[in-house]
Image (spheres, grey):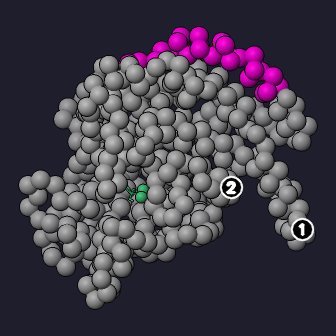
Amino acid sequence: MIIGKDIIEQYNKAEIENFTADFDFLQNKLTKSGANVAEIVNKIADFQVAIPSWALGAGGTRFGRFSFGGEPSSLEQKLDDVGLLHALTHSAGAVSLHIPWDIPSDVKAIKEKAISHGLVFDAMNSNTFQDQAGAKHSYKFGSLNAVNEDSRAYAVEHNKEVIRIGKELGSKSLTVWLADGASFPGQLNFQTALSNTEKSLKEIYAGMPEDWKLFIEYKPYEPNFYSTTIQDWGTSFMLANACGERAYTLVDLGHHLPNTNIEQIVATLMYKGKLGGFHFNDSKYGDDDLTVGSIKPYALFLIFNELVYGMENNPQNPYPAWMIDASHNIKDPLEDLLQSLEAILIAYAQALLVDQKALKTAQLNNDVVGAQDILQNAYRTDVRPLLRAARLQTGAALDPVAAYRNLKVRENLITERGLETKATGL
Ligand code: LRH
Ligand code: MN
Ligand code: MN
């Protein structure tokens, strides 16, 4: 199924009157308070978030999986799905591949498919947390940190292979997430595990083309439940520094213990020029991978406030690679991703509304009440008309979920691909 611009234009016609009234009201209000509305709308329109190839099928838990009809069963079909999201939103212009779940069998055809949907290949993801069928060495007791030299070399080689595939596709970065750790005290020597990890990452870094970046993800627990070798941003930061200039920390929102001040981590990393990438999701307990903004939207706004500040004030930090890392068991995965995209853009737009000058003045005067008010004024603004204005500007749907339902996208996908489908991934 392909959603053409004309279909979206047609669909938007019915919505335009309501939109215009809401937008005019908000534009007046914001302009009076000194905001540059056109600039904010342009920034929202430009913001692109990568969709991971593993989020397009219904996710499962270790207790089971409920499939969703019409799921993509090949990489081509996955790109078609991201293409649908991009056509509806114009905010999902990139895809992030997981190897070996999504090895392209025909690189040329895959590239053409991506171009036809206006998509680029963002960070490549390696996988040394599962043993694949026929694997020569096991990752059961670790990969880049392993005491077993063969497993370690095998894991390094896999990452080099991912870089090779990524190069052919035009990607420019590699994300490494390691499950490596221990489930019981005494299982491994922390220092040896860390030093092995550092050595392996340096080898991978040395194998990257000069214009590539390495993103090092961290996570406190799961699947190991006693210790994880790269457990926190400090460890990731240290390893990135050991690798070199083009190695960075990647923050995944779900990879923190409850109540961690993630916005402060973001600020610290950007100050040091080391925030390379960002994975969006939401959670109540741990790495729940729930729809972005579904549980803690204020925390998301505070994080975006630091991201916006950093993007404006930290030229030493590269523009971060954005990706949604969420997939859920019970929702239509495409609707879920549309909701995530909406939540990301809402938080971004709210952060763009923060009066930075007034905030600085309040901070200099130790005006605690005033500073909180400035942030909450922005957070409590209904910015959705700004998102719609951006979509109208780019030819996307004013209300993507409503359009998705109206156009019967899932029903069409089921007709095309069948009910009994299973996407590769988690
Ligand atoms: C680990 C993680 C990582 C990926 C993905 C599948 O929890 O967030 O980014 O490789 O899940
Ligand atoms: Mn992640
Ligand atoms: Mn995760």
| Range shown magenta | 1-24
Quarter-wise, where is residue 224 in the image?
bottom left
Secondary structure, mark 1, is: loop
Residue drawn 8% across and 61% down? Answer: 136
Indicate the quadrant containing the N terminus: top left, top right, bottom left or bottom right: top left
- Badge number at residue 367: 1
User: For the stretch drawn in magenta, what is the main secondary structure?
Assistant: helix
The residue carrying mark 2 has its beta carbon less than 8 Å from ligand 3: no
Residue drawn 61% across and 26% down? Answer: 399
Query: Is 43 placed left or right of 166 in the picture?
Result: right
Category of crowding for the residue at label 1, using alpha-carbon neighbours closer than 10 angstroms: few (below 14), some (14–19), many (at least 20): some
Q: Does the magenta stretch include residue 279?
A: no
In the rendered structure, which disc, 2 or 1, sits on the residue that comes first in sequence? 2
Residue drawn 22% across and 59% down? Answer: 130
Residue tagged 2? 298
| Residue 157 in sight in this render | no
Nearest the eye: 245 or 157 = 157
Q: Is residue 287 above or below residue 166?
A: below
Secondary structure, mark 2, is: helix
Query: Is 100 placed left or right of 234 in the picture?
Result: left
| Horizontal and vertical percent position of residue 336 | 49, 39
| Horizontal and vertical percent position of residue 53 | 35, 41
